[in-house]
Amino acid sequence: MNYEFILNDLRPSQEEIDAVNKTTEKVISFLNKTCKEENIPAQAFAVGSVAKNTWLSGKSDIDIFIRFPLKTDEAVLKEKGLYLGYKTNDALKGKASEHYASHPYLTCLIDGIEVDIVPCYWIEDGSQLKSAVDRTILHTRYIQKHLKKSQEDEVLLLKKFMDAVGTYGSEFKTGGFAGYLCELLILKYSTFEETLRQAQDWKFHTKIDLENYGTSDNKLFKNDPLVFIDPTDKNRNVAAALRIERMLDFIIASRNYINLIDSLEDADENIIKEKVLKYFSPLLKERFQDKSVKEISDDILDEFKDRETQTLVISFPIPEMNADALHPQLLKTVESISHKLESEDFSVYSYDYWTDEKNLVIFIIELNVFKQSKYYVHEGPKVWNKLAFNNFSAKWSQESLYHKGEFIVFDRERQFVTAKELVKHLLEKDNIHEIKVGKNLRKAISSTHTLCEIDEFLENIDQFICDEADQREFLNTLDDLLRPGQYLKR
Amino acid sequence: MNYEFILNDLRPSQEEIDAVNKTTEKVISFLNKTCKEENIPAQAFAVGSVAKNTWLSGKSDIDIFIRFPLKTDEAVLKEKGLYLGYKTNDALKGKASEHYASHPYLTCLIDGIEVDIVPCYWIEDGSQLKSAVDRTILHTRYIQKHLKKSQEDEVLLLKKFMDAVGTYGSEFKTGGFAGYLCELLILKYSTFEETLRQAQDWKFHTKIDLENYGTSDNKLFKNDPLVFIDPTDKNRNVAAALRIERMLDFIIASRNYINLIDSLEDADENIIKEKVLKYFSPLLKERFQDKSVKEISDDILDEFKDRETQTLVISFPIPEMNADALHPQLLKTVESISHKLESEDFSVYSYDYWTDEKNLVIFIIELNVFKQSKYYVHEGPKVWNKLAFNNFSAKWSQESLYHKGEFIVFDRERQFVTAKELVKHLLEKDNIHEIKVGKNLRKAISSTHTLCEIDEFLENIDQFICDEADQREFLNTLDDLLRPGQYLKR
C-alpha cells in the first residue's frame, strides 16, 4: 500500500524543519558559547525525535542535552544545568518552566517551539549510566545509527496510527507505546504495515530481542505483557510502561486495520484512501460538531438515561503532589472503589476518571446493579468443619443459622442498600482506609469531595468545571465511556 | 440424660398397641384363611415399624406382606396380590386405594388404621431379591434380630428428633432419613445421644459398614453424601435417597442439640426438660397462633416488604403423573428457573415450591436483584486468539467491540431488563425448553399458569388456593422461606 497521500501530512514541512533546525542551532550554540566563556566543561547537543528525524509534523519537541564529564558531582550537574538553562532561556527571550525527571530540567518556549534543556552525563555505553535521562543519548544514537532513511516514514505512520487509536505515549496517563518503542518496532519489522500484521499475532508476554542478548526471560519482566529488550541495555524492557490494556487495543486496532485493507484490495482508490485515512486522523465525533456544551451534555445525559444505569460522579481538588504520580494514583483509587462496590454485590458497568491535571479530579462510576435488598447471605465456614462451625455458631448465637451449599450462613442486614450510600461511606475520613487510595489523594478526597449522580453533575457542570475547553474534554471522556471501542475500528 | 419424660409421649400406649395388634391379626388371619380356602400358596405376615416395635405413638402404619413362592410368575403375583387385598378390605369393611411401588399394592383404612397389603416373594436372603419391596422382609428380620429391647426407645427418640428438625422420611419430598436408616444408626451408635454426638463429625461421604462387607468404596456410591451399607445387601446404600441438604440439617441440629445439653449440665431440671423438649416437638410459630389466614398473610407480606426483595409466585395445576415423580420434578424445575435467572445476572435470594399434591403447584422465587440496566457485556474469546477474534469480529461486525480483561466484548442489549419478564418468557410454550422442566410438567406449566408478585398473590389467595388448611400450609412454606434455620435450633 502506498501511503504517500498520508505521509504528505505527517512529514514536517520544509518550513517547519527549517524553523526547528534554526532554533535547535541557536540554543546549542548559545549553550556551547556560554560553557566556553564560563569554563564549564560541558557540551550541548540535540537528542530525541528531532535528532532522529522521526517527529510528526506539528509535534516537534526539541530536546537539548548538556553533557557533563562522568566525574562531575551530581549536585554541580544539577545546579549548572539549571543555571545554563535559565541563562539560555533569558538570552533567547523564552518562557521557562521547571520539570523533574531523574533531576531538574527546564522546558522553554523559544520561537514558539518547546525546547527541553536537560543536563546529563557524557556516557558512551549503558555500563556508564548514571541517571535515567542519560539513556536518551544512547537511544538517540542507536536509532540514528540503525534506522534507514526510508524507515523514517514508516515510523511516522506507526506513531500517527498509534496516536489515532489511542495507544501512543508511554506517560502514565496513557500507558501506551513510547516513541522509541515505535522506532524499534520498525527496526524489527521494517515497515508500518508489517508491524501491524505481526502485532495481530502477539500473545501475552511476546518477547522481542533485537540484538539477541538472550535476556528476555529475566524474571523482572515476567508480568510485562510485551518484552522488548532495549538494544542499548540488555537488562531493560523498553515496553515496561506499556499497560496490557493499550497492548490489547493496539492488537485489536491492527487486526481491524489489516482486515480492512485486505478487504479493500480491489476497491476504488478514492474509497481506499478515504477509509484508510480514518485510521490516521483524530476521531470525528458527530455529537461534538458545532454543538454547545449544553447541547452535548443533554445528549450524553439522554444516552445515560437510556442505558438505565446509575452513574455516580465524585469530584475533588488535586492535592499537592508530583504530577507523574497523579494518574497511577487516580486509576488505582477509582479501580479500588469499583472493586469494593463489586465485593458488596453491586455491579459496576464501567468506570473512568478525568482530570485537568491542575485543579480538579472527577471519578465516574457507572453501575448496572445499584440497589439491593435489605439482607445478604453472610457466609461462614463449611458445615463439615465442626470446630469452625462451633466458633461461628457461638459468635453469631443470636442469628438463625442455616446452610447454603455446604456453607453455614445466616441472613445479615446490609450496611448499605444502595451503591451511593456505600461510596459516601468509603469517602469519609474514618473509612477511606477501606479502599486503596494513593497516599497523596487520601486526605484530599476525604476532606473535600462532592458525590452526585450524573444528571445532577451535568446540569450544574459550570459549578464543577469552570473552563469550557475542560468541560468539553470531560464530556469527551464520558463519550469514550459510553463508546469504549470507537477508536479501534474506524 | 434420662429421656423418660419424653418417651412417655413417644411410646404407643397399651391401648394403641392392643388396637394395632388386633387389626394386624385380623388382616393376617383373614388373608391366610383365604389363601388356604382358595388354594393360593401364599402366606401373610407383618413387616415394618409395627413388626419391629419402633413406631411412634400415633404413627402406626401396619404393613402386611403376602409372600408368594419364588417360582410364582410376576403377573400372577400382581393379580393375586391385589385380589387378596381387595377381598380382605371388603371383608373387614375397609376403604381401599391402589398405590404402586415396584408393583401395585393396596392401602386400606381398617378400624381407623392405615394398612398396606403388599404382595412379595418368599426370600431368605438378598441374593434371591426379585423386587424392591422384598427388601422390607429382610430389613424387618434384620432389625428384629439385632435391635435390643432397650434400643427401641432410642429409635423412637431419634425418629422424633429427626421429625422435629425436618430430616425424617426418605420420600422425595423430604429426601431425609428413612425409618430403617434410623434403626441402623442406633445399631451402629447404640443410643440416640451417641448418634447425635457422632453425627457432629460426619463429613461428606462418611461411610458406615456395620457388617464389614468392605463394599463402601463401590463407585456407585461416590456421589452419595452418606454411605450406610445395607446389612442385608452389601451392594446397596441405605442412605442413597438422603439429600445432602437433609444430612447437613441433621449435622447442624445435632451440634446445636449436643451443645445445648452440654451447656445445661448443671441447670435446673425443669429448665433442662423445657429446652430439651423443644427438640422433640413440632415448631410453635407465634405468627400462626390464633390468627386468621388474612392476619398471617398480612404479617408475612409485611416481612417480605421489609426485606426489599421482589418475590415472584408461579402457580399451575398438577398434571396427570405418578405422585412419586412429582416432588423431584418440581424441585428440578424451580431450581432450573432460578439458575436461569442467575445466569442472566439477576440474583436469587431464595426459592421453594409448595403443592397440595392433588391439584395445585406453587413456585416461589425471591430475588435480590430483579431489575438491571439495558445492556450487558457480551463476552467473546480472549483477544490473544486471532482466529477466534476474527470470527467473533466478523459475526458482530455491526457492533463496537472492545476488550474487558483479556476478552473481546461488546455492549449488547438485554432481552429482559426485569426478572419477571424473563420468567414470563421462560414459561411460554415456545421457550420452556430453555429450562430443565420435568417432562410431565412441561405442558401443564406452559399451557396454564399464573405469574404474579407475592403481594398480588396473597391479596387474592382465595382465588388460588380454595381450602383454608392448604392456605395455612402454603403460608407456612413462606414462613420457612423467610426463616430457613428455624427448625435446626430450638
Image: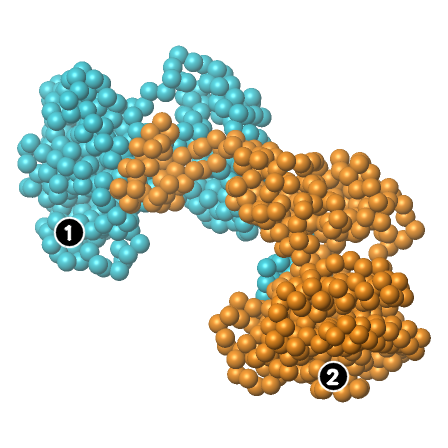
Chain colours: A cyan, B orange
Tell me if mark 1 has few (under 14), some (14-19) or many (20+) residues whose alpha carbon lies within 10 angstroms of its own.
some
Q: Give the x, y percent position of residue B350.
A: 65, 50
Q: Residue at x 67, y 46 (%)?
A: B320
Vertical arrangement, residue A94 with respect to residue B408, above or below: above
Q: Badge 2 sits on which subunit?
A: B
Q: Give the x, y percent position of residue B376.
A: 48, 36
Q: Quadrant of the C terminus of chain B?
A: bottom right
Q: Which mark is residue A333?
A: none
B94 left or right of B185?
right
Residue under numbered circle 1:
A209
Q: Give the x, y percent position of residue B225.
A: 58, 69
Residue under numbered circle 2:
B144
- For badge 2, the amino acid type reads Gln
- In terms of depth relative to the viewer, which is nearer, A460 or B237? B237
B176 left or right of B36?
left
Vertical arrangement, residue B137 with respect to residue A336, above or below: below
- In terms of depth relative to the viewer, which is nearer, B126 or B365? B126
A235 left or right of B185?
left
Q: Is residue B211 visible?
A: yes
Q: Badge 1 sits on which subunit?
A: A
- In terms of depth relative to the viewer, which is nearer, B348 or A437? B348
